Amino acid sequence: MSIVVGTTCSSLNRISVKLIHPSQSPLPSSRPMENPKRVFVCGGGVIGVCTAYFLAKKGAAVTLIEKSDVACAASGKAGGFLAHDWCDGGPMESLARTSFNLHRSLSQQLNGPESYGYRPLTTLSLTITEPNTTTTLPSSSATLPSWVDAPARDIKTIGTFETTAQVHPQLFTKTLINNAVAHHGVKVVIGKLERLEVVGDRVKSVVLEGGRVMESDAVVLAMGPWCNKLELLSSIFRVYGIKAHSIVLEPREANAITPHALFLSYYPSKQGNPLDPEVYPRPTGEVYICGISAEEEVPDDPEGIIGDPESIGMLKRVAKTVSSHLGEGQARVKAEQACFLPCTDDGVPVIGEIPGVKGCYVATGHNCWGILNGPATGAAMAELVIDGHSSIVDLEKFSPARFARKRKA
């Protein structure tokens, strides 16, 4: 069964941006395979979709398996912020830089500005203390955009059009899978992965709930925090979920909101620890605000996740404090939501072949950087599955073998 998921967003058709960027990573080339490798990618989030896309471009016969719907979890509720050099100095430096450049290449190929709101951003950090009264003096700064009328201080530019950008994550993910289905033969199957069948030391098939068995040459597990529900993976490493909250607003005066991403140190009026919310205006006219997260048990159904009222209420307070354009009566609340970010115990994604099970691969644990690192993860995984090694990014530091312990035969 093939499924094409809608991506229309009429407000994006008017977007026109001039892109100014550093060096560009070329997209991996596609080539037909004489005997296409049958690869099943489990998980319809950005990591799974990018992996399916690049595998299909390399000639594999790809089937994407998703329990609910493409981009129904974190990939549909994320901020979509992209940063070129924010992971520098850590294990994800090469992955992030490569992926940032791949995002730009994909945008040029897939008409990203109109299809999914790709655009460069100016990014600011600032400190805001919530006022104790309703009467406050707005800040005055040449750096601060005019729509931010909160009493702000410590205003710094931490990203420019050359180093930070954004996508609408749900539209990006759905645009990519639609392209993969229409032009590269990817099939999408809606069903829950029950288990993998392993014969000897090699994966042989995937089994869906209800008993459907599909033979495979390779399987990629890209189910975010739900990877931890598979004993094959949980016996080697832990992937846990951080529940992150967000709201989406539609301001009346959307044209007044300029493309400035805000990273806040926010001090509530009542005593307490500062919060770290983030504000992302989108070219759709929406404003996305996120923050307030904590580790929680990951539920079975991604579509049943709802936000905590107290956390959602706090984000609304942040919104009206940051800008009078985002307060009650000036902006409609389009969404109140939460999602689970996949995290590992060492803070590094897990990307590679499962020790002791040939043909079985995993890609998860990207935390809040899944949208950014999706393209490079998918391209690297495609190379690993088809060619036996990745040249676009060195995956050694991401290998699940770092967690491996002796397992019973």
Image (cartoon, helix red, strand yellow):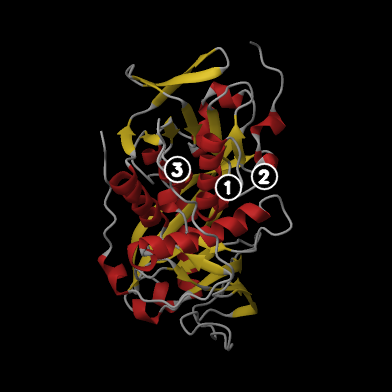
**Residue for badge 1:** 367
Counting from the top left corner in percent of width and height, residue 335 is at 36, 57
Alpha carbon separation for disc pair 3 and 2 = 30 Å
Counting from the top left corner in percent of width and height, residue 366 is at 57, 46
On residue 159, the disc is none
User: Residue at (48%, 29%) from the top-left corner?
Assistant: 219
Ranked by sequence position, the earlier of labels 3 and 2 is: 3
Marks 1 & 2, CB-CB < 8 Å contact: yes
User: Residue at (54%, 41%) from the top-left corner?
Assistant: 383
Amino acid type of the residue that numbered disc 1 sits on in the rendered structure: Asn
Q: Nearer the viewer, mark 1 or mark 3?
A: 3
Counting from the top left corner in percent of width and height, residue 201 is at 58, 16
In depth, the one of 190 and 202 nearer the eye is 202
Secondary structure type for disc 2: loop
Amino acid type of the residue that numbered disc 3 sits on in the rendered structure: Lys
On residue 58, the disc is 3
The answer to whether one can see residue 141 in this image is: yes
Secondary structure type for disc 1: helix
Tell me the crowding category of disc 3: few under 14, some 14 to 19, or many 20 or more residues within 10 angstroms, Cα based: many
Marks 1 & 3, CB-CB < 8 Å contact: no
Tell me the crowding category of disc 1: few under 14, some 14 to 19, or many 20 or more residues within 10 angstroms, Cα based: many
The answer to whether one can see residue 297 in this image is: no
In depth, the one of 77 and 71 nearer the eye is 71
Amino acid type of the residue that numbered disc 2 sits on in the rendered structure: Gly
On residue 347, the disc is 2
Q: Quadrant of the C terminus?
A: top right
